[in-house]
Image (spheres, helix red, strand yellow):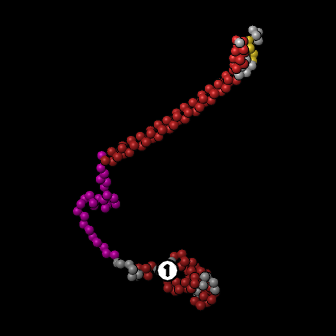
Amino acid sequence: MANEKQNYSAEFKKEVAQKALDQSKKNLDKLAEQYDVSVSVILMWATELEKGGEDVFKTEDEEQQSPSEEPTENVDIEITSEEIADSVEHGVMADKLNYKRLIFWSVFGTILVIIFVRGLMEMYEYNMNTTQERVSSESEYYQVNQMKKEARQQLESFGVVDLENNIYRIPIDSAINTMTADEE
């Protein structure tokens, strides 16, 4: 087998790795014998090709010689504006903010948010008061109905009011019938 530290060309590495990938990384022993490269190196090249793509095996020299890159051209520019020269030197342009407009919109936005929050609070209070009034009115209605039931039950039943003075309670219908019978 060949020395693992031997330098192979990018094309050779790409070709062997592509064949290994085409074979789904099987039968690498035959491929290793055919190209006189160890199986571990072929696996490493195939993995690099899978992860890195076509240009993974290019060396720095080959990348510098690639025809897709255009040579860069140095250009000297003389800047006459002191403001631009200062901006280029510091890497930023000076801010030319309209502070009156910035303050106006900040205050306006803050006021709108405050009005919105206050409106939400008013709505919450209104809903709470309405709910409490409804619950209390329903509760009063329930109490009034309960008192009417008790009063009706008292009017329609027999009972003792004061035993010592011999005062008794009789249903109102019975009292009316007794009074009409006495008058006849």
Q: Residue sitting at 73 percent across and 21 percent down?
A: 157
- For badge 1, the amino acid type reads Glu
Q: Residue sitting at 52 percent across and 83 percent down?
A: 14
Q: x, y percentage for residue 67?
A: 39, 82
Image quarter (top left, top right, bottom left or bottom right) of the N terminus: bottom right
Residue 2 occupies quadrant: bottom right
Mark 1 neighbour density, 10 Å: few (under 14) some (14–19) many (20 or more): some
User: Is 141 in the magenta?
Assistant: no
Q: Residue sitting at 63 percent across and 27 percent down?
A: 145
Majority secondary structure of magenta residues: loop
Residue nearest the observer in this picture, 76 or 43: 43
Residue 33 occupies quadrant: bottom right
Image quarter (top left, top right, bottom left or bottom right) of the C terminus: top right
The residue furthest front is 184
Q: x, y percentage for residue 82?
A: 25, 59
The residue furthest top is 165
Residue nearest the observer in this picture, 7 or 140: 140
The residue furthest left is 80
Secondary structure under badge 1?
A: helix
Q: Is residue 94 above or below residue 179?
A: below
Q: x, y percentage for residue 135?
A: 58, 33
Q: x, y percentage for residue 139?
A: 60, 30
Q: Is residue 134 left or right of residue 162?
A: left
User: Is 76 in the magenta?
Assistant: yes
Residue 144 occupies quadrant: top right
Bounds of the magenta span? 72-100
Q: Is residue 108 left or right of residue 125?
A: left
Residue at numbered disc 1: 54
Q: Is residue 50 above or below residue 115?
A: below
Number of numbered callouts drawn? 1
Residue 119 visible here? yes
Q: Is residue 42 left or right of residue 88?
A: right
